[in-house]
Amino acid sequence: MQLLRRDTDQPLPHNEGSPEGLHFHRQQHDWWVPIEGTFQAALADLRPKSPTFMNKAVFRLSAEESQCLLVPPGVAHGFLALSDMTLIYAVDRYYDGTDEQGVAWNDHTLAIPWESASPIISERDRRNPDVEQLRLSGGLPG
């Protein structure tokens, strides 16, 4: 198991108010372990053949409560740092950018209730398509 992404040798720090995602992988499982701080996590099942297709879950994870999260392939995931935080981001295979697809963080179909009215979104995440665009282009996970 790769404990840290190949492009870094350190846990991933995030400042309060900083979001990440939504993204999903077709092959890779992700495992998030907060080692400092608290974040809001959001999941959305984008697997058309899943009985929970288009269901979402939103919750908080905290280093103080010794929590972690396992994200299966095909489930879009993102988080918002609710405090300065550090996250161990483990995966079950070497990171491969071709396995990753983004989904708009503010997709109206998913309607994730983010706990920030004005998050600072990365350029990469601003370009992500919405779920309907993914569906029409055949981009949803199989």
Image: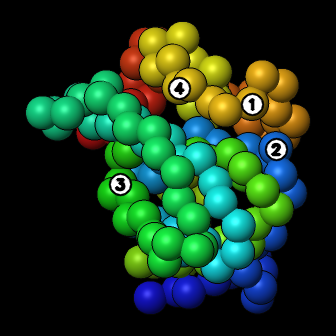
Locate the C terminus and report the quarter of the image it occupies: top left
Amino acid residing under circle 2 = Gly
Separation of marks 3 and 1 at Cα, in angstroms: 27 Å
Residue 133 screen position, x and y as percent = 52, 15
Residue marked by disc 3: 73
Q: Is residue 41 left or right of residue 142?
A: right
Few, some or many C-alpha atoms within 10 Å of disc 3 (few <14, some 14-19, many ≥20)? Answer: many
Residue marked by disc 2: 17
Q: Is residue 14 left or right of residue 22?
A: right
Q: How is the image coloured?
A: rainbow
Amino acid residing under circle 3 = Pro
Residue marked by disc 4: 112
Q: Is residue 74 left or right of residue 4?
A: left
Who comes first in sequence, dot 3 or dot 1? 3
Nearer the observer, disc 2 or disc 3?
2
Q: Are marks 2 and 1 in contact (CB under 8 Å)?
A: yes
Separation of marks 4 and 1 at Cα, in angstroms: 11 Å
Q: Is residue 138 left or right of residue 6?
A: left
Amino acid residing under circle 4 = Ile
What residue lies at 86% left-to-right and 57% top-to-bottom?
A: 15
Does residue 69 show up? Answer: yes
